[in-house]
Image: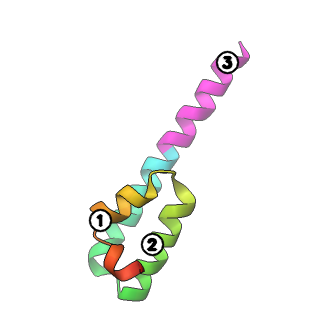
Amino acid sequence: MASAVERVRELRRRRSRKEKLAKLKAKLPKATASEKVEIARRLRSLTPGAETLIANWKLVEVDR
C-alpha cells in the first residue's frame, strides 16, 4: 500500500501548491514592480510550469 500513501502525499502537495498560487495571484493587482519580481521568483521555486504562469500573469516584462 506504499503507492497509496505516495498518492496521498502527491495530492496534498498539489492542493498546497494550488492554494499558494491563488494567494500569489490575489496579491498581483496591488503589487509594485519589485513585488512582482518577487512573485515571479516564488513561482519559479514553487512549480515546474512557472514560465507559463509568468507569461499568463504578464510578469515577463517586469521580471526581465
Horizontal and vertical percent position of residue 50: 45, 58
Q: Secondary structure at mark 2?
A: helix
Nearer to us in this view, 50 or 34? 50
Image point (40%, 62%), residue name: 23
Q: How many marks?
A: 3
Q: Which mark is residue 39?
A: 2
Nearer to us in this view, 6 or 44? 44
Residue 49's place in the image compared with 28, above or below, is above
Mark 2 and mark 1 residues within 8 Å of each other at the beta carbon? yes
Image point (36%, 58%), residue name: 53
Q: Amino acid at mark 1?
A: Trp
Q: Secondary structure at mark 3?
A: helix
Image point (35%, 72%), residue name: 27
Disc 3 to disc 1, C-alpha distance: 35 Å
Residue position marked by numbered label 1 in the rendering: 57
Horizontal and vertical percent position of residue 21: 42, 57
Q: Secondary structure at mark 1?
A: loop
Horizontally, residue 40 falls left or right of residue 45, namely left
Classify 10 Å Cα crowding around label 2: few (below 14), some (14-19), many (20 and above). Answer: many
Of mark 3 and mark 1, the one earlier in the sequence is 3
Residue position marked by numbered label 3 in the rendering: 3
Q: Amino acid at mark 2?
A: Ile
Nearer to us in this view, 5 or 44? 44
| Magenta-tinted stretch | 1-15
Give yes or no for residue 12 being in the magenta stretch: yes
Q: Quadrant of residue 51?
A: bottom left
Q: Quadrant of residue 62?
A: bottom left
Of mark 2 and mark 3, the one earlier in the sequence is 3
